Amino acid sequence: MCSSNRYVHKDIIPFTRKIMLCAGQRSLITYGELQFQFYKDRNTIGFYAGVLGFVCEDLEWPLLNSLIVSKTTGQSSRGFDPFTKRSEQSWGDNVIDCYNKFKDFNPNKDKKFIKEITDELLYWDGYSFEDIMEVSAQ
């Protein structure tokens, strides 16, 4: 564990809100769409997705990173595989759990969710990019 990535957490908050909005709209989003919207490369988006997954696990929430998919397959990337194993649920079941928890999510009304995940993101002493890539490769 390291805390050298704290600067990332402020960037990840709007990213996380976007994923929560997708859950509320019962939709998926591609890595490419996120790259375009947040002006980040695929590795950075993958890192954000990994951090988001770990934070969801810490909060005992459905895995919001399950909503990020490959444009070519329409399913999660291999980076999501370790989360599937730990959650003991299929990718599809994780998606449905997100849809159910964040049904009709509205960031202007659902302040509890925003505060909870923002606090966790800002104070999370998470893994480095290399750690997350290593876990994803297993």
Image (tube, rainbow, N blue to C red):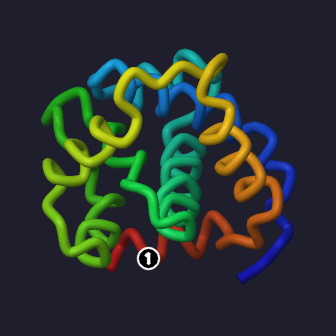
Packing grade of label 1 (10 A; few <14, some 14-19, many >=20) is some
The picture quadrant where one finds residue 55 is bottom right
Amino acid type at mark 1: Val
Which residue appears at 20% of the width and 74% of the height?
88
Q: Position of residue 69 (x, y in %)?
A: 28, 37
- Determine whether 49 is above or below 131 in the image: above
100 left or right of 127?
left
Q: Quadrant of the C terminus?
A: bottom left
Q: Position of residue 19 (x, y in %)?
A: 47, 32
The picture quadrant where one finds residue 70 is top left
- Determine whether 10 is above or below 19 in the image: below
User: Number of numbered discs present?
Assistant: 1
Q: Which residue is mark 1?
A: 135
Which residue appears at 49% of the width and 39% of the height?
42
Q: Position of residue 64 (x, y in %)?
A: 41, 46
Which residue appears at 68% of the width and 50% of the height?
116
Q: Position of residue 2 (x, y in %)?
A: 78, 78
Which residue appears at 69% of the width and 71% of the height?
126
Q: Quadrant of the N terminus?
A: bottom right
55 left or right of 68?
right
- Determine whether 96 is above or below 119 in the image: above
- Residue closest to the eye, 37 or 10: 10
- Residue closest to the eye, 121 or 33: 121
- Determine whether 109 is above or below 9 in the image: above
- Element under label 1? helix
